[in-house]
Image: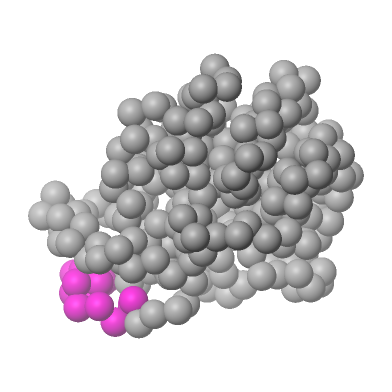
């Protein structure tokens, strides 16, 4: 596993296991334990996923020491509106059955609330219960708004990032501020025929890798931290097996040319943040 160093010195595994849409406890426990057995050391969950307790149970039952596992969770929008950020954080700690969280994120930039939420995360961070704090789904204007109220720079910005939607302007801005970018939905969440794209098929044949591995290698070489989700042991192993080859500059350019602004997830520009 490759590690990336965040702007506060904390190291994060460069590929994480996403657990979105795994609310059923036994399936979530099985998936996370399998992931840890297969070599993952980075688990990305959120309060709204309704599986923090399952993640905590899987970590306990895995036999892997807690300090070897990087756990991310997020504060949801309703708690931003009610101002119950600290209470939500404590509830996550309890559900995950841990004394600290490695990375805690503002899940969405809820208008009129996210700046206050960030200030509260800043206080929790100073208590030592969080190793790093960051944001998710933030646009450039949202990041600039945080700069107006805090000197604490987010460690990461977790955004939709996949071959059809590469967000280069936002990624470049984050890089200029020392903010690492995490990619949710790196395979378009299964909503397209992405893996049949000729460029991916051709590179897959050249390197003896799957189209998914080509995409993850593309992310890794860009310095992105992808968060693929899989409940299949074979695919979990495949998703980690991307550190033994390197795409050429020309091939990186070919993959970059796939970008067509094809967002498949929620757009913060027109979201009600419910």
Percent of width and height locating residue 19: 65, 62
Q: Is residue 242 above or below residue 141?
A: below
Residue at x-position 78% and y-position 33% = 100
Seen from the viewer's position, the closer of residues 163 and 59 is 163
Q: Pinpoint residue 167: horizontal percent, then vertical percent.
A: 33, 52
Tell me the residue at 63%/40% (across/down): 112
Residue 190: percent from the left, percent from the top?
A: 47, 77
Q: Quadrant of residue 23?
A: bottom right
- Coloring basis for residues: one colour
Q: Residue at x 25, y 72 (%)?
A: 200
Which stretch did the figure color magenta?
194-208
* Image quarter in which the C terminus is found: bottom right
Query: Is 252 on the left or on the right of 23, as rendered?
Result: left
Q: Please tell me which residue is depicted at 40% across the width and 57% down the height of the picture.
A: 161
Q: How many marks?
A: 0
Give x and y (percent) for residue 241: 42, 59
The quarter holding residue 193 reads bottom left
User: Does residue 21 show up?
Assistant: yes
Q: Nearer the viewer, residue 90 or 12?
A: 90
- Of residues 7 and 85, which is closer to you in this image? 85
């Amino acid at each position: 596993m490759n590690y990336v160093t965040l702007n506060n010195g904390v190291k994060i595994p460069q590929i994480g296991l996403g657990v979105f849409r795994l609310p059923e406890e036994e399936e979530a426990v099985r998936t996370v334990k399998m992931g840890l057995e297969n070599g993952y050391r980075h688990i990305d969950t959120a309060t709204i996923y309704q599986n923090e307790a399952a993640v905590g149970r899987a970590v306990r039952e895995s036999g892997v020491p807690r300090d070897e596992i990087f756990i991310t969770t997020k504060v949801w929008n309703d708690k931003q509106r009610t101002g119950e950020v600290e209470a939500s954080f404590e509830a996550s700690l309890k559900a995950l059955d841990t004394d600290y969280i490695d990375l805690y994120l503002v899940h969405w930039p809820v208008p009129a609330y996210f700046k206050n939420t960030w200030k509260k995360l800043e206080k929790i961070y100073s208590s030592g219960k969080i190793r790093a704090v960051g944001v998710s789904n933030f646009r450039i204007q949202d990041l600039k708004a945080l700069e107006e109220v805090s000197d604490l720079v987010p460690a990461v910005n977790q955004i939709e990032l996949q071959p059809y939607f590469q967000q280069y302007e936002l990624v470049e801005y984050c890089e200029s501020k020392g903010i690492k970018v995490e990619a949710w939905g790196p395979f378009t969440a299964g909503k397209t025929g992405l893996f049949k794209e000729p460029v991916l098929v051709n590179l897959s044949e050249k390197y003896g890798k799957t189209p998914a591995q080509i995409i993850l290698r593309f992310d890794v070489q860009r310095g992105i931290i992808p968060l693929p989700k899989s409940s299949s042991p074979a695919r979990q192993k495949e998703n980690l097996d991307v550190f033994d080859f390197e795409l050429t500059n020309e091939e990186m350019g070919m993959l970059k040319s796939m970008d067509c602004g094809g967002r498949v997830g929620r757009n913060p520009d027109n979201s009600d943040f419910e």
